Amino acid sequence: MQNRTSRMLCGVSVAAAMAFSPVTQANHSWGSYHWSRTSNPFTLTVADNVSSGWDASFGLMISDWSKSSVVRLARADGTVANLRKCNPTRGRVEVCNYSYGRNGWLGIAQIWASGNHITQGTVKLNDTYFAMSAYNKPEWRNMVMCQEVGHTLGLDHQDEDFYNANLGTCMDYTSNPAASPNNEHPNLHDYDQLAAIYSHLDAPGTFLSSPTNEAAGNVPEDWGRLMRTSNGGRTEVFEHELGGGHRVITFVIWAEPRGKGH
């Protein structure tokens, strides 16, 4: 890879697909975060605020994640007025695309949580990079869309080794999502992990609201305290406390450690 831009994957992935044995993460839940519900499968609304160039990837994502035994995604028309902010809406995931700038990420996933319960979420897809020839391809759009929405369901990455071959899941790092097995869709391990995350049911009355519908911002200064860093600074999780047990969690993968070009 020749430069920082060419090393970028999503606000959630980068990799070099090389012929080493893949190592699948045995448990790839994102902490214990999950949506509250009283039965399975439950329906989660995902709002379409994306432009026409993203329509195919959005539809594929809805179809792919709805194959889970515990969650069904339902498309809704988006109502976000300011795509740069991509304000959240209680009880659903807003998916937005916009030219967010050369800030180091292709996409970021953000969730608002009350305790361990997700109350709302957003996905932001950075057209500044997707306009470049390296990423202006269906396989990149499919992978990033799939992975970011997977995070809002409570999933972490299956693998974060930059030198493993593709695992055949969008929750894996890669520099070539179209390589065999392609990383454009969830795989069985993702569906099994969702079944484990949502194996318990929540009592009626635990559907908690978020204290704010304000957007969480697009740069680290907006994301609160750094809670986790790994992979030499490439993987970071931030947490912004809102009070009363409410918080916003932002999951970002940088192409290189922060401070080097960010």
Image (cartoon, rainbow, N blue to C red):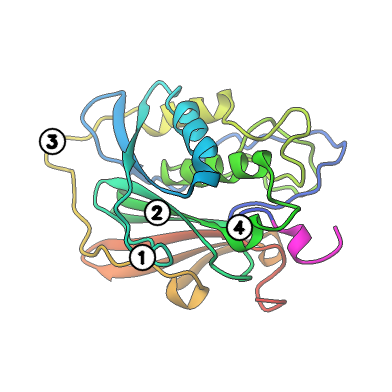
Q: Which mark is residue 122?
A: 2
User: Are there few (<14), some (14-19), or many (20+) residues within 10 Å of tag 4?
Assistant: many
Looking at the image, is mark 1 or mark 4 earlier in the sequence? Answer: 1
Question: Marks 2 and 3, Cα distance to the nearest angstrom?
Answer: 25 Å
Which numbered disc, 1 or 4, marks the residue closer to the eye? 1
Q: Are marks 2 and 3 in contact (CB under 8 Å)?
A: no
Q: Earlier in the sequence, mark 4 or mark 2?
A: 4
Q: Which tag, 4 or 3, sits closer to the chain's start?
A: 4
Whole-angstrom CA distance, mark 4 to mark 2, is 14 Å
Disc 4: which residue: 106
Q: Amino acid at mark 2?
A: Thr
Instruction: Please tell me whether residue 40 is drawn above or below residue 154 in the rendered image.
Output: above
Structural distance between the alpha carbons of marks 1 and 4:
19 Å
Does residue 35 appear to the left or right of 105 in the view shown?
Answer: left
| SS state under label 1 | loop
Asked if the magenta segment contains residue 11, the reply would be no
4 vs 3, front mark: 4
Q: Is residue 167 above or below residue 69?
A: below
One can see residue 136 in this view = yes
* Location of residue 166 in the rendering, given as x and y in whole percent from the top left corner: 74, 35
Residue 146 position in % (x across, y down): 54, 39
Compute the Cα span from label 4 to label 3.
38 Å
**Sequence-wise first label, 3 or 1:** 1
Using the image, tell me which numbered label, if any, was put on residue 204: 3
- Quadrant in the picture for residue 7: bottom right
